Image (tube, coloured by chain):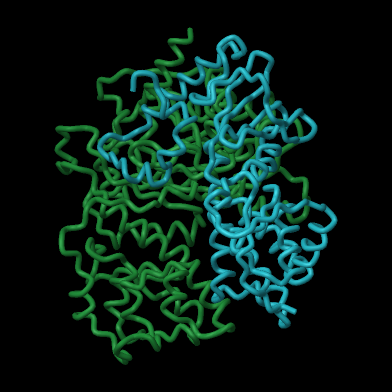
Amino acid sequence: MKEQVLKKLQVLADAAKYDVSCSSSGSTRPAKDGALGNAARAGVCHSFTEDGRCISLLKILYTNYCIYDCAYCINRRSNDLPRAAFSVDELVDLTLNFYRRNYIEGLFLSSGVVVSPDHTMERLIAVARKLRNEHHFNGYIHMKAIPGASAELVAEAGLWADRLSVNIEIPSENNLRLLAPEKNFGSVLSPMNQIHQGIVVNKEERRKFRKAPRFVPAGQSTQLIVGASPESDFDILRLASGFYKQQQLKRVYYSGFVPVNLNDSRLPALLKPPLVRENRLYQADWLMRFYQFSFDEILDDNHSFLDPNFDPKLTWALRNPAFFPIDLNTASYEMILRVPGIGVRSAKLIVTNRRFGSITFTHLKRMGVALKRARYFILCRELPLQLKEVDPVYIRRKLSPSIQPKAVQLSLFEHA
Amino acid sequence: MHEMKASSLSLVYDGSYDGFLCAVFEAFERRILPQALLPASRPLQLLLGDQQMLETHPNLAERVRKGIIRKSSPRNASLLHVAFLSELPGVELLLLRYLVKLFADAGGRYWQNMLDEEVFEVVQIARKVKKEVHRFNGFVRFQETADGMFFAPIDPDHNIIRLLARHFRTRFSGQQWIIYDTKRNYGIYYDLHTVQEVVLQNHRINFNAGNVAGEVKALDEDFYCRLWQEYYDAVNILERQNHRQMTNLMPRRYWKYLPEKNKAGK
């Protein structure tokens, strides 16, 4: 019996790992005295795997049997691999016992599609319902909304889960059709739109009745695979930007394609997952969410891919030299945010502290500004040459990496 | 009043925050900046000059505490306490220099000025401590004992154990637990009602491995621990191997009590 659970765990954790979302933040599920768990506004990473990703949730599939045959997915029905399915009780027991030991702070439950989308969705709901109702579990639950599941089931899922997600996976309709013949954009967008509507309505209800049950309090997210199909970074950022604006997603995750299925002529032959590209996309995503950039400032029709050698903010600055130099002692917060090498925290520190005196290099260094980049774009008395103009050619030469960038991944998964 | 003269005297306090605040009081009374301000637990033989062991009077400490709040804010007062808990060498003198400036400040905004070296240092150190608290909200690993108690050993850089109480009290209000600092040899114990400090005597815990002795372990403890270890290995994506990133986010010094990093035969 125990050995069986162990086997299932190995198979179904291994099969779940390509979903990159690890976030457990943004929810406010207050603890009830005597009950188990709560959801913290800022998520907590509980461990980090050898690939540098954070573990905060028990990320697991209900089953890896699947009726679909998507080219990019390890669990497609034509793959010959060990298959397993948990029972509802086994998953509940695992979650509770991992949670009590502080291995995790919640459950991320996904699944291959068995029998039908509705059947699968029902099984996932049964796990979450049992955790919430019978075990008074207050920890974080992230659940997949299965594309094609009925509106009633998605609505019920939203009552038990903190976050729901539907993965778009392939960033364009044509290529999704090619790689996942049984899926289409509509089947992904319709639950996404339903969840969005549900959240909007719920917010309104809770304004009127404070006791109204919460619906998906941590919002929804999606994932798209980068490099399995030929879309440009511009296409991807445009799509992501639309998700943030229209469906008001909390997060879009970019997953560098790991070639799990060899010998499929529909897929590119990659030796390694495109980690640099994935990293640049995350940086661009950050610019959209925290730095007030719009996607068409970062890229446009003439520049449809992010530069692997420079971060997207630096690339933008080099294309817009007229915007600089910026005087840190007088410029607005929004303008300071646009300086390469200055992050959200240091921009705030500059704005709140310049009333005490003028900001010097020593201050900037202490605040954690990357002067290596920032120095070319700011006015500062200590600079040897008071620069009046920004020369992109010169800066580009100065900052060019002498070797090809390594596949370094910044700590994007740090923020659980 | 705020001319403080450098002195070759070393002030020694009992190690508590109250004791430190009394030392601050003493320094202000005598208008000296002592050569050193140290807890009694730190070896003193290397110090030159005179030493003076101070007594701790809670009412004196309270006066200093109130003064800090009056000159800044309650939040800032607890920030200073957090920085103190870093136990970094020299943090006491840094805080003293900070307090000299704070109490001399007529404008009432000294403590908000991050361009000031002491203010920045203190905020930076407090941030470090809070970061470790946040990390340990995740890195604490409980083991269940046969009588349903959950025990977790920790070995943090800073003296953070009291700062962990609120998070764990909220999250695990329905189970009894102990989080124990094996280096500083004290812990916090939650008995389903309140959290209190404890020192374990006669304990059946191996402080090196952090294991609860076999005979007091819950029946299923090893099983769930093994499941967790297997889970940790199973979710790793080999093609994305990034050991450096992992050790940046979860430095080796924290692995001691993490079962996923201490798999037998690994």
Q: Residue at x 27, y 77 (%)?
A: A318
Q: Residue B126, relative to residue B134: is it above or below?
A: below
- Residue A412 in percent (x, y) is at 40, 52
Residue A126 visible in the picture: no
Does residue A101 appear anywhere in the picture? yes
Q: Is A230 positioned to the left or the right of B173 in the image?
A: left
Residue A223 lies, in percent from the top left, at 39, 46
Residue A145 picture location, percent across and down: 49, 38
Quarter of the rendering containing residue A85: top left
**Quadrant including the N terminus of chain B:** bottom right
Image point (29%, 45%), residue name: A176
In this rendering, the answer to whether A179 lies above or below A113 is below
User: Residue drawn 46% across and 31% down?
Assistant: B256
Quadrant of the frame with the C terminus of chain B: top left
Q: Is residue A34 left or right of residue A162?
A: right
Q: Residue furthest right?
A: B59
Q: Is residue A239 above or below residue A319?
A: above
Q: In this rendering, would A281 be left or right of B50?
A: left
A204 left or right, relative to A269: right
Q: Position of residue A71 (x, y in %)?
A: 25, 36
The foreground one among A294 and B81 is B81
Q: Quadrant of residue A300?
A: bottom left
Question: Is A298 in front, or is B27?
Answer: B27
Which residue of the protein is positioned furthest toward the front in this rendering? B49
Residue at (41, 70) in percent of width and height: A369
Chain letter, green in picture: A
The color chain B is rendered in:
cyan
